[in-house]
Amino acid sequence: MPSSDHETTLARQWELLRNHLPSRPPGRTSKDLRDRLEAAGHNVQKRTVERDMVELSRIFPIVRNENGTPYGWHWQENARFDVLGMDLSEAVSLGLMEDVLRQIMPPAFISALEGKFSLAREKLAALPKIPHARWKDLVRYVPPGIPFIPPTIAPGVLPFIQEALLQQRQLLVIYKKTGTHEAKEYTLHPLSLIQQGARSYLVASAFDYDTPLLYAVHRMASATILEDVVKRPKGYSLDTFIDSGAAQFGSGETLTLKARVSDELALLLRETPLSKDQKITTRSGVHSLTANVPNSWQLHFWIRSQGAAITVMKPVALRNHIITSLKEALGNY
């Protein structure tokens, strides 16, 4: 075989091993693998791919699934093998990300990563004397506030939501809104998925309305994927939705918060500002805060949680709302 042909074959087979073989059945057919190779820049016939796979399966733990036709190729289940290997930084990164990824990624994606997660754990366990290998045991992400236990999600609901998002299909859900006693049927147009602390929220518009709203995944009793395609609101993007404050259960409006804050809160807010345009001025020992922030439920909750450390001056409507809330809270005591 001429050198150029040998290099072409090696590059093609390397591409197959690195990127295109799933970790479990039913696997990918030779036609599917050929299409993926062509998309990656390899001009190849299906018969050539079939020969490649037979040849590779003699060397690597690759299985041909013969339970259906056409046959599918995949890595042997539970095989502890990685073509590229895994360096220490990759193992540490995967170890740190595993818990988070399991909460937000579709099951099909997680299944494809199981081998890498296992390889990362084995890599770290095999290098106990190397300081960097212990990094996963030395750091943790702790969310601010009380560490709530995640709510229980009905079996099958989250995978259907994730699949509907990927396929851009409408969802029929049985959903109980906050403050109601009975669940109702909703036809939703799923747009995005947000993980907010311990809770997962689906961003979706309902029925024929265009306004995206948040729907708590744990309040869905069931979810069914429909054949109808999602109707996306004009100009919608997840980043725009979040930047508007809607992910904080807000109206999408912005207000200019003016308040007096304590020494401790002023220090905290100088370190971690409420907004990019935040200003804190100090005169005669009094700290005055000004910041443009989304008008949201979470803003109100945060202000109330600060107690005597903050006194809202403007807007007047917000000030009056906080006064009423504090009086009601005091009445409970």
Image (cartoon, grey):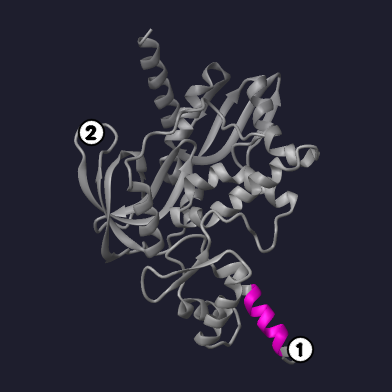
Task: Name, please, the residue furthest toward the top.
Answer: 333
Which element carries disc 2, helix, strand or loop? loop
Is residue 260 visible to the viewer in this orientation of the structure? Answer: yes
- Of 182 and 1, nearer the camera is 1
Task: Name, please, the residue furthest toward the front.
Answer: 58
- Of 57 and 333, nearer the camera is 57
Query: In terms of sequence position, does the residue under pointer 1 or pointer 2 come before the other?
Result: 1
State the residue at coordinates (47%, 55%).
238
Which element carries disc 1, helix, strand or loop? helix
State the residue at coordinates (50%, 53%).
110
Query: Is 28 displayed left or right of 333 in the figure?
Result: right
Query: Is 306 displayed left or right of 123 in the figure?
Result: left
Rendering coords of residue 244 (x, y %): 48, 49
Label the magenta part by its dominant secondary structure: helix
Residue that carries the numbered disc 1 in the rendered image:
3
The magenta stretch is: 5-14
Rendering coords of residue 66 (x, y %): 41, 70
Task: Name, please, the residue furthest toward the right.
Answer: 130
Within the magenta stretch, is there residue 95? Answer: no
